[in-house]
Image (cartoon, rainbow, N blue to C red):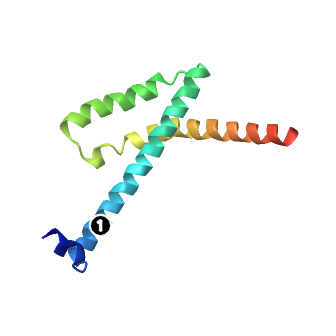
């Protein structure tokens, strides 16, 4: 049975299922990159003594409220502007570190 499934030609249903899995993987990768940049931005804000806890409190509160009751993507959309603020700080931190490293390499 398994050998016939592997050797059988792809059907429209299989192609659609594979495309759906690919979209989910792309969304997962984008979410993980965003989460990593949020972590870097939060770390930078903490290190620079910036009061970022109200922004982080909103994110945590909404996740706690909606994760247990409504696990739908449309309910997490209000979090994206808040997450983008922290992610932008993370991107800025990574960019400044890279430019600082490049200038140090050029001076050497």
Residue at 36% from the left image edge and 42% from the top image edge: 78
Disc 1 is placed on an element classified as helix
Residue at 75% from the left image edge and 37% from the top image edge: 100
Image quarter of the C terminus: top right
Q: Residue 107 in the image: x percent, y percent?
A: 87, 39
Q: Residues within 10 Å of mark 1 (few under 14, many from 20)?
A: few
Is 2 situated left or right of 108 in this image?
left
Residue at 23% from the left image edge and 43% from the top image edge: 71
**Residue corresponding to mark 1:** 18
Q: Residue 92 in the image: x percent, y percent?
A: 63, 39
Q: Residue 26 in the image: x percent, y percent?
A: 40, 56
Q: Nearer the viewer, residue 35 or 11?
A: 11
Q: Nearer the viewer, residue 78 or 56?
A: 56
Please say whether residue 104 is visible from this viewpoint: yes
Count how many numbered circles sit on residues in the image.
1
The quarter of the picture where residue 54 lies is top left
Please say whether residue 50 is visible from this viewpoint: no
Image quarter of the N terminus: bottom left
Q: Return the residue found at the far right.
A: 107
Is 1 situated left or right of 6 in this image?
left
Q: Return the residue found at the far left.
A: 1
Q: Nearer the viewer, residue 2 or 87?
A: 2
Q: Nearer the viewer, residue 71 or 20?
A: 20
36 is higher (above) or lower (below) than 49: below
């Amino acid at each position: 049975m398994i050998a016939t499934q592997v050797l059988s030609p792809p059907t429209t249903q299989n192609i659609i299922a594979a495309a759906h899995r690919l979209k989910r993987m792309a969304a997962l990768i984008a979410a993980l990159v965003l989460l990593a940049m949020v972590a870097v931005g939060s770390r930078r804000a903490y290190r620079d003594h910036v009061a970022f806890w109200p922004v982080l409190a909103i994110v945590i509160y909404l996740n706690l409220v909606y994760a247990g009751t409504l696990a739908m993507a449309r309910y997490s959309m209000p979090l994206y502007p808040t997450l983008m603020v922290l992610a932008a700080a993370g991107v800025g931190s990574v960019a400044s570190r890279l430019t600082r490293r490049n200038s140090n390499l050029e001076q050497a």
